[in-house]
Image: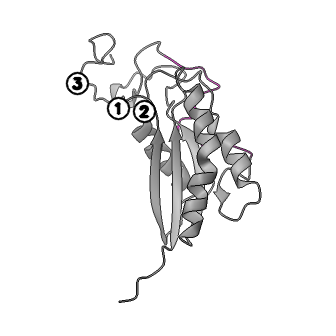
Amino acid sequence: MTQKGPGKVDILWIVDSSGSMEEEQRYLGDNFEAFISTLARTGADFQTALTSTDICPDSIPAEKSERACPVNYGGSSSTRHRGSFIGNTGHKVLADNDPDLETLFAKYANVGVNGSGFEHGLKAAEMAVGKVVSGENEALIRNDAFLAVIVVSDEEDDGIGLSQADYYSGRNYT
């Protein structure tokens, strides 16, 4: 049996931007070289992009189905990436052959710690992919590539439904 090579991999990183993540963001950037050198040894053709877990809107929408964060909780408008890729315009998607891949990834991974304390990693991934499809994000996803989503956080995902109570106040998001 001959095993086929690893092919193409598109990697979407969702990095927690809450107040407790400063050290973890630094570790992620510092250790990215070990990750990509291991991936490079497989021969994979990969590219990567980052966004944050902070998806809180600037104001709470009237429609409950559009709410992702409790009223008046968390983040600042400058940290609400809402699925948008982080980085330099035209260079937010980093390729395996970028000469400055490690430096830019470490810079982009430092998403700051002023984001919402309600970490929505899975919703941020959904929003980021939606923005790739609509053209709002750079083209990370290739038709012939495997998509890997990695959420880096020190908390569980706060993507609870509106019918459930939130951990902090015992109320739902109304």
Give SS at disc 1: loop
Count residues near mark 1 (Cα–Cα under 10 Å), then give few for <14, some for 14-19, many for 20+.
some
Q: Main secondary structure of the magenta part?
A: loop
Q: Position of residue 148 (x, y in %)?
A: 45, 56
User: How many marks on residues?
Assistant: 3
Give SS at disc 2: loop
Please tell me in which quadrant of the rendered image residue 87 appears.
Answer: top right
1 and 2 marks in contact (CB < 8 Å): yes
Q: Which amino acid does label 1 sit on?
A: Gly
Region rendered in magenta: 74-88
**Residue 159: mark in rendering:** 1
Q: Nearer the viewer, residue 42 or 65?
A: 42
Q: What residue type is labelled 3?
A: Ser
Depth-wise, is mark 3 or mark 2 nearer the camera?
2
Depth-wise, is mark 1 or mark 3 nearer the camera?
1
Residue 9 in sight here: yes
Earlier sequence position, callout 3 versus callout 2:
2
Apparent side of residue 106 relative to residue 125 in the rendered image (left or right): right
Where, quadrant-wise, is the N terminus in this rendering?
A: bottom left
Q: From the viewer's perspective, is residue 58 above or below residue 24?
A: above
Farthest right residue in view: 99
Apparent side of residue 17 relative to residue 100 in the rendered image (left or right): left
Which residue in the structure is indicated by mark 2? 120
Q: Position of residue 105 (x, y in %)?
A: 66, 47
Determine the residue positioned at 59% across, 50% down: 49
Determine the residue positioned at 53% across, 60% down: 10
